[in-house]
Amino acid sequence: MLRRTGERPIPEGRVSPLNRLCTYIVTEDTGLAPNPFWGWCTLAVCTPNHQGARLNKGDWIAGFLGAQRCHKFLYAMEINQSMPMNKYFDDPRFEKKKPSLRGGWQERCGDNFYEQRSDGVWIQHRNRFHLGQEYLKKDTRHPIVFVASRFWYFGRSCKPSPQEYAELIGGRGIRTKHDPVVAAQFIEWVETAFEPGIHGYPADNPDMTVDEKKKSSDAPRGIHG
């Protein structure tokens, strides 16, 4: 059902003051950020985290690739929870997201590697991609992790972005001040055009074998890895 605001229809129940859409450009699709594996899509160490995006349950995040990749649509997630990073590390639901450098490529790209000591100091555990003090400082400046059980991740099967949503894409950093009509229509497009889940494997993961990369475009559609 549609309700009208002025001349333009907004899908019913979409984009209220508590239902925001945050968009940004994903520079590398390694499986780290976002991390769509083990039944949850999590965003722990990427641009919306670094910029302290104020997002709550019911808000959306959508990531697009850069101009050199024609701003293709990579993923979207409907946030279940915005949780403190120290609680994320201790939560048993996300134990599998702790990187295992001896495991397969999915285990190695886990995003759950920051632990906070009782004195407030952050510990950066071994991980595949974010090593050193520069990353530690940037990743823990705004220590909030976005968690979603309902998400759409495309990886190598990323989708062309319809022209009518071009204004949602581009620029540096995050964007949250969107035309509410366009934002609502984009969300409706995602929900109606695609099944939730994983539709392809990461395009830029350096640990995938040649055979895995060949098979990545044939990843099962709409599954949770």
Image: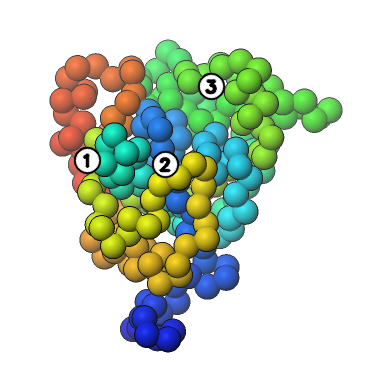
Please indicate whether residue 83 sits to the left or right of residue 205 in the image. Answer: right
The N terminus appears in which quarter of the rendering? Answer: bottom left
Total of numbered circles in the picture?
Answer: 3
Q: Percent position (x, y) of residue 155?
A: 29, 37
Q: Is residue 94 above or below residue 222?
A: above
Of badges 3 and 2, nearer the viewer stands 2
Relative depth, front residue between 170 and 224: 170
Residue furthest right as drawn: 119
Q: Residue at x 52, y 42 (%)?
A: 173
Q: Residue at x 27, y 36 (%)?
A: 69
Would you say residue 173 is visible in this rendering? Answer: yes
Please tell me in which quadrant of the rendered image residue 122 appears.
top right
Q: Residue at x 36, y 44 (%)?
A: 64
Mark 2, secondary structure of its residue: strand
**What residue does disc 1 label?**
157
Mark 1, secondary structure of its residue: helix
**What residue does disc 2 label?**
25
Q: Percent position (x, y) of residue 217?
A: 18, 35
- Any mark on residue 130, and which? 3
Amino acid on which the number 1 mark rests in the picture = Ser
Q: Percent position (x, y) of residue 6?
A: 42, 86
Q: Is residue 32 above or below residue 224?
A: above
Q: Residue at x 45, y 15 (%)?
A: 101
Amino acid on which the number 3 mark rests in the picture = His
